[in-house]
Image (cartoon, rainbow, N blue to C red):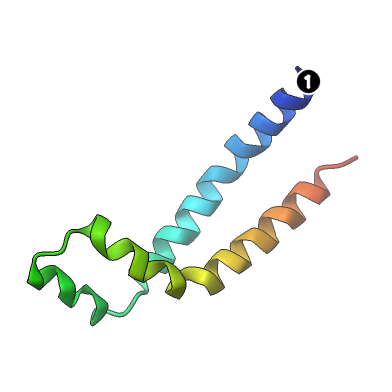
Amino acid sequence: MARFSTIGANNLRGVPFVAICLLAGCDDLAHALRGAALDGATEWQNSPRDLPMLTPIIAVVMTFSVLFTFTDFQ
């Protein structure tokens, strides 16, 4: 039970950082890709096309998350 509590607390601590970084990355996407919305596509239909462009941001966020997790060990 203690292990799951520690994992849950670590996840709750890291979610805001990951969310803000991914939202900034989504905001930085080229506006030319958003032209599909004019054709009637919804945001959920466009998201599979946006995910490969977020891979550099996801890599940085995952690196920082791992570093933050390892610095928690006393």
Q: In which quarter of the image is the C terminus?
A: top right
Which residue corresponds to the image point at 53% horizontal and 53% vertical from the top-left?
18
Left/right of residue 73 with respect to residue 66 in the rendered view = right
For the point 69% across and 63% down, which residue is it? Answer: 63
Q: How many marks?
A: 1
Q: In this view, does 54 lie above or below 4?
A: below
Q: Which residue is drawn at 64% across and 59% down?
A: 62
Q: Position of residue 43 (x, y in %)?
A: 23, 59
- The N terminus lies in which quarter of the figure? top right
Residue 26 higher or lower than 1, as above or below: below
Q: Where does residue 70 sit, x and y in percent of width and height? A: 81, 50
> Taking 73 as reference, is 61 above or below it?
below
Left or right, residue 55 beside residue 2: left
Q: Residue at x 80, y 43 (%)?
A: 72
Residue at the spot of label 1: 2
31 left or right of 73? left
Q: Among all residues in the image, which is located at the extreme top?
A: 1
Residue furthest out toward the right: 74
Q: What residue type is labelled 1?
A: Ala
Residue 37's x, y, as percent? 14, 68
Choose top left, top right, bottom left or bottom right for residue 45: bottom left
Query: How many other residues sit within 10 Å of disc 1, few (<14), some (14-19) or many (≥20)?
Result: few
Q: Is residue 16 above or below residue 23?
A: above
Q: Is mark 1 on a helix, strand or loop?
A: helix
Q: In the image, is 34 to the left or to the right of 74? A: left
Q: In which quarter of the image is residue 28?
A: bottom left
